[in-house]
Image (tube, helix red, strand yellow):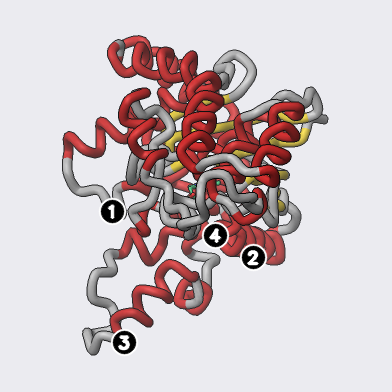
Amino acid sequence: MKKQVLTGIKPTGRVHLGNYIGAIKPALELAQNEMYQPAYFVADYHGLTKIHDKEEMSQLSRGIAATWLALGLDPEKAIFYRQSDVPEIFELSWILACFTPKGLMNRAHAYKSIVEENAHTGRESDTGVNMGVFTYPILMSADILLFQTDLVPVGKDQIQHVEIARDIAENFNHTYGDTFTLPQHVIEKETAVLPGLDGRKMSKSYNNTIPLFEEPKKLQKLINKIKTDSTPPEAPKNPDDSIIFTLYKEFAAEDQINEMRSRFTSGISWGQAKKELFDVMNARLEEPRQKYNELMETPEKLNEILQAGAEKARQKARPFLEEVKIKIGLQ
Ligand code: TRP
């Protein structure tokens, strides 16, 4: 039996290098292994907790789908779908809600940090919290548990959500006997946090990201914005202290990396280092960028792929949901 691997991306912003290196790339690498059955999806209903603009939602959601495909996801091998096309997820979500202690949701970090921020600024504790935000982890549990997922490749910030899915599954299994597979998170690079333009973690909330499929000219401009110090051009520089080198390592080949490392220690100007970073990044991203642009320009084609994927997902989901409903006495 193949192990089920599943992960989703929510459409709340343009996909950036941090998303790619931290989540998409490792997930696609896992899919190369014949031992795994991958399922990848666009978590559009999760996006709805934040995005309340029709155009923005449809654009961002298509963007996520096109990104997966442009980076090499094979819809023949993986189950690839849009969450909102698989209504079984929401049926299960309600069932799971009835096995979720409210206290577990109170402790979920995204909700908790809004509440803490509100306390800090003297606002009422639930200001800015819709019920989608509050029950977000339940929907994510349904995503995971409906497909009997073994492994969930995610970024560090999502570990708690996968643990919540486990907790909920255990609660259900405890009452009705073994039903849900207990999922495990997979973190590819525990230590590597991709730095953004200012050196802090690359994140939309810090406004320091480099969009993955930025046009070459703009990409070069953004790279030029990377914060550097005032070390003179010919002075030796510590590669391991440099945002430029950290990014370079993600895109260059082994021998290029070694070469660049020694040029840092013998002295390379920041300007030159940035130029070479652009070159390796652009070389790697050129083809996927073109594929991405093509897919964004042919929404019908994208839709067709997603519809076929949703059908595949529902075929797998339906019988299992029936089984669950029989267990709780609803069939
Ligand atoms: N919450 C995840 C994120 O913000 C996205 C997501 C939704 C997800 N459902 C999922 C990830 C199921 C893994 C499995 O990144």
Q: Nearer the viewer, mark 4 or mark 2?
A: 4
Report the Cα–Cα distance between label 4 and label 3. 22 Å
| Amino acid type shown at disc 3 | His
Mark 1 and mark 4 lie on one chain; the one further toward the N terminus is 1
Q: Residue at x 42, y 56 (%)?
A: 198
Q: Residue at x 50, y 76 (%)?
A: 107
Q: Which residue is mark 4?
A: 157
- State the image quarter where residue 61 is shown: top left
- Whether residue 228 can be seen here: yes
Q: Nearer the viewer, mark 2 or mark 3?
A: 3
Q: Nearer the viewer, mark 3 or mark 1?
A: 3
Using the image, tell me which numbered label, if any, was put on residue 50: 1
Label 4 CB-ligand 1 distance < 8 A: yes
* Residue 206 vertical position relative to residue 29 in the rendered view, above or below: below
Report the Cα–Cα distance between label 2 and label 1. 26 Å
Report the Cα–Cα distance between label 3 and label 1. 22 Å
Mark 3 and mark 1 lie on one chain; the one further toward the N terminus is 1
Q: Nearer the viewer, residue 274 or 32?
A: 274
Q: Which residue is mark 3?
A: 120
Binning the other alpha carbons within 10 Å of mark 4 as few (below 14), some (14 to 19) or many (20 upward) gives few
| Amino acid type shown at disc 4 | Asp
Mark 1, secondary structure of its residue? loop
Mark 3, secondary structure of its residue? helix
Mark 2, secondary structure of its residue? helix
Label 2 CB-ligand 1 distance < 8 A: no
Q: Nearer the viewer, residue 110 or 318?
A: 110
Q: Which residue is mark 2?
A: 167
